[in-house]
Amino acid sequence: MEYSSSEDDELVEDYIDVEDDTGAENIDQVAGVLASQIHGVDPSEGSMPPVGNQLMMAADMVGKSDEPYVGMEFKSDAAARAFYNAYAVRHGFGIRVARSRSERRKGVEVLVMKRFVCLKEGHHKKKPDEPSNKKKRKRLSIRDGCPAMMEVVHRGPDKWVVSKLVLEHTHVIVSADRAREVQLRRLSGKFQEHETQLQEVRKNVFGDADAQGLFSYFKRMQSENSGFFYSAQVDSRNCVSNAVWVDARARMAYTYFGDAVYFDTTYTQNENMLPFAAFTGVNHHGEIVVFGCALNLDKTESSYTWLFETWLTAMDKRLPFSFTTDEGKAMTAAVAKVLPQCFHRICRWRILSRCKKRLSDVCTRFPGFHDELKRCVNGCDTVPIFDMLWDSILDKYSLRDDTWLQSLYEMRHKWVPAYLTNSFFAELSLAHRIDTVGRFYRNNFSGRVSLNTFITRFDQYVDNLYASEAQKDLTSFPTEQLLKTNIILEKQAASIYTKAAFETFQVELIEAMQHFAVKVEDGPYMKYYVERHSDPLTRHTVFYNIAEKKAWCECCRFSFSAILCRHVLGVFILDGVIILPDSCITKRWTKKAKTGPELIGLNLGNDNSSIDSVSSRYNDLVRDAMKCAEKGSVSSGTFRIAKEVLSKAFMEIKALGEKLNRDVVQNGESI
């Protein structure tokens, strides 16, 4: 006799197996089995801790090295289930009993096999249509065919052995802290309050309907483009709590401009907006580029962790150099877990915008206060100058005792540019705020709209962004910029940089002509003092190595934005450097930023992956096809050529595939 679970029969709890199946103990018994074996306590004596604590203790005892293996033995099927359940809690996924088998021995039904699987195993099977007068709530299937499982068979008295085992999952699994967080919230009595809040947010997003409209959009987009990626996180009621989606264009753009990423949660500033977040960056024209979208209904640490992990999966686990977010403990903790190698920055513009609310009385009494604070933050490129001006502002406006400003100063290394000298943030100008999707919100919505309307308009907005980028790519060749000097450095920069990058360089070059550089030390790295109009407060130290053609300034402007600062340019002018060294030109700001392979960031993917894998070959071809589509869509002429080339290539590939198939049939070989 075999038993298989049904999706309609299961009761799915967050990463905890609570399904009550034929011949299986309930959750208290299952948790008690493993807890009693670990702690040596008889559950019948009534000395066991509560079930939630039992599961957490069991998960703690199942360490990272305690993984199941074929041949592993247990005293009972309940012990096997308890072990696998605790293992699942530790690793952040849920399980259920998918199948069991019994045999008749001496007239008695004896259980001989059980198979425990991931909650996402299999696929939902549609049932025959029921009578129309019977209403039934549509339920979102969370199954995606995950193969992870552990099967045990009965081999003798008190002996159950693992006979089949699959550890790999086909979906992103969150950290073990996700299960711990859910259980601790339940044990502390905050679970119901959190669930109520989440249900209210979900109602605001989806209205009285369910999330099927969102998934219909996902499936339609994927049918139109196989490079479209999406994933959703569901809670204990199979209701969507978070979602991430990334299209092929975003994945392509990320390979060029994903060195600095912003997790844009501008919606938090407008109570009418949906909880929609975007992963964005800056292209070579200094304009916003979208790397992915997210619905962020559940604002907990584990939810942010899932969002970041899922998005990184879509980006082939390639990390940016810097990751900028809003302020928040949950978000900060998630970034530390998922992107520890990235420099995590707090958005200074969001902090500065809060000043008007947090210090409204000061802003009202002193109208120039806010601008003065912005100049202090954005205008100081060295730590001593910033500290001096910050102190003067506190004294001038009697703000020494303001606890909020004190907290901002304590975390200054996370948001003040003078302290951010070791990473790249793709900011051409510190004085101007990088564009965000906030402008999209302001231009399109004055009140709440449906999710479908929102996504439709956002897709149109993204289309316009790509169209603008393509147009600027087209007009950047061979147009020359307006030169303001007769310096060869300027002419060279105009020929290689995009308009936005060149204008930034031009400002720095003109400022360099107002500075005076003096060599104060000779050697392999010559030392210079550079200052404006003999003002010691503007003095910066520059080191220059002629042999290696490398220069470094204490303002670290080049590290921050990849555009040379006025101080280094002042040294170049003094020493008669007429051509920018290659080491001083970053490709991402040039007109050729999107030519050739340019995979940025740190790759956290499988080290064993190679060009021989299907996924690697597929991703490589998608990038090439996207380049062809991008250039081919600019005009009718380029479109015609692109179609002809792609059609010819497809026919040749198809012919080769048919030939290989014939060879396989004739020779009995595998491809």
Image (cartoon, rainbow, N blue to C red):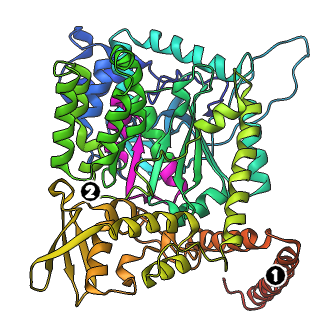
Using the image as rendered, state which of residue 359 and residue 132 is in the foreground. 359
Q: Residue at position x 32%, y 17% from top?
A: 362
| Callout 2 amino acid | Thr
Q: Which residue is mark 1?
A: 654
| Callout 1 amino acid | Lys
Percent from the top left, x then y, of residue 351?
Answer: 37, 32
Q: In the shown orientation, is residue 141 left or right of residue 102?
A: right
For marks 2 and 1, the one nearer the N-term is 2
Q: Count neighbours of disc 2 (C-alpha within 10 A) and say few if under 14, some if 14 to 19, many if 20 or more.
A: some
Q: Quadrant of residue 45?
A: top left
Q: Which residue is mark 2?
A: 421
Q: In the shown orientation, is residue 270 left or right of residue 76?
A: right
Give the distance between the C-alpha atoms of the residues marked 2 and 1, in whole angstroms: 52 Å
Percent from the top left, x then y, of residue 436?
Answer: 55, 42
Q: Quadrant of residue 278?
A: top right
Is there any visible trace of residue 141 in the rendered image? no
Q: Nearer the viewer, mark 2 or mark 1?
A: 2
- Magenta stretch: give its range: 311-338
Q: Secondary structure at mark 2?
A: loop
Using the image as rendered, state which of residue 259 and residue 39 is in the foreground. 259
Using the image as rendered, state which of residue 537 and residue 20 is in the foreground. 537
Percent from the top left, x then y, of residue 574?
Answer: 26, 81
Using the image as rendered, state which of residue 204 and residue 438 is in the foreground. 438
Q: Residue at position x 54%, y 18% from top?
A: 198
